[in-house]
Amino acid sequence: MTGKKSEFLGLFNQNYPGNNSVFLHCVIHQDALCKSALNMKPMLDAVVKLVNAIRSRELTHRQFRDFLQSVQSEYSDVLYYTKVRWLSARCVFERVGQLKDDIVSFFHDKLCSAECEMLEDTERPSDFAFFTDILCHMHNLNVKMQGKNQFIDDIWAHLKAFKQKLNLFAGQLAKNDFLISRG
């Protein structure tokens, strides 16, 4: 659709050489929009490392699932993060957050507390919750923008509203007000 020579963009520019049109490749790639604005990589890497510590070794993974069953956890496992579906990070962060105490207990029982340092960080405990909330809001934006009969003006309105929401969050964080709703 946006090829510079043979697809729509190329043909349009060829037929209307003096146009002032702006072409957007894809406005719903939040990973490109938000990863550049937020330094999410350290937190994302820490969560992925934690999940991989549980899931990448079959014995540890089985022991973790058995541990969750023995403590009668609401969940039976942690979720894998996949780069292909970037917003899957939201589900991974939420599940790790919901299993935080169980994960910490599991690693302490195994004498591997280094694995869960990120969850026990008392210096910046709100970072994890903040990124989980932001990912939730990004997911909601993504769902709105992919709805049926969405035209560019609708998508633009969703993006403007999301930007206003981020400005509101920034103001709240500046005041150390960490109560961000997920609505």
Image (cartoon, rainbow, N blue to C red):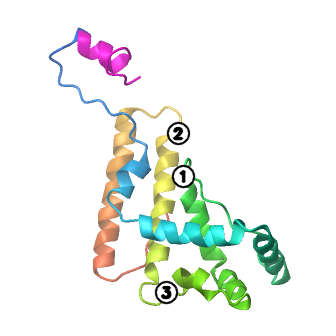
Q: Compute the Cα span from label 1 to label 3.
A: 25 Å
- Label 3's element? loop
Tell me whether the residue at label 3 lies in contact with that at label 2, contact meaning CB atoms closer than 8 angstroms: no
**Outermost residue to the left:** 18
Find disc 2 in the rendering and name its residue. Answer: 147
Sequence-wise first label, 1 or 3: 1
Q: Residue at x 33, y 77 (%)?
A: 173
Tell me the crowding category of disc 2: few under 14, some 14 to 19, or many 20 or more residues within 10 angstroms, Cα based.
few
- Does residue 12 appear to the left or right of 113 in the view shown? left
Sequence-wise first label, 2 or 1: 1
Where 174 falls versus 183 (above or below)? below
Mark number displayed over residue 121: 3
Locate the N terminus by quadrant.
top left
Tell me the crowding category of disc 1: few under 14, some 14 to 19, or many 20 or more residues within 10 angstroms, Cα based.
few
Between 36 and 147, the residue placed more toward the observer is: 36
Give the residues in magenta.
Answer: 1-14
Where 95 falls versus 71 (above or below)? above
- Does residue 83 appear to the left or right of 12 in the view shown? right
The three-letter code of the residue at mark 1 reads Lys
Q: Is residue 163 magenta-colored?
A: no
Q: Compute the Cα span from label 3 to label 2.
A: 39 Å
Find disc 1 in the rendering and name its residue. Answer: 83
**Labels 3, 2: front one:** 3
x and y percentages locating residue 172 in the rendered image = 32, 75
x and y percentages locating residue 81 in the rendered image = 60, 59
- Does residue 73 appear to the left or right of 83 in the view shown? right
The three-letter code of the residue at mark 2 reads Gly
x and y percentages locating residue 142 in the rendered image = 49, 48
Tell me whether the residue at label 1 lies in contact with that at label 3, contact meaning CB atoms closer than 8 angstroms: no
The three-letter code of the residue at mark 3 reads Asp
Tell me the crowding category of disc 3: few under 14, some 14 to 19, or many 20 or more residues within 10 angstroms, Cα based.
few
Say which quarter of the image contains residue 176: bottom left
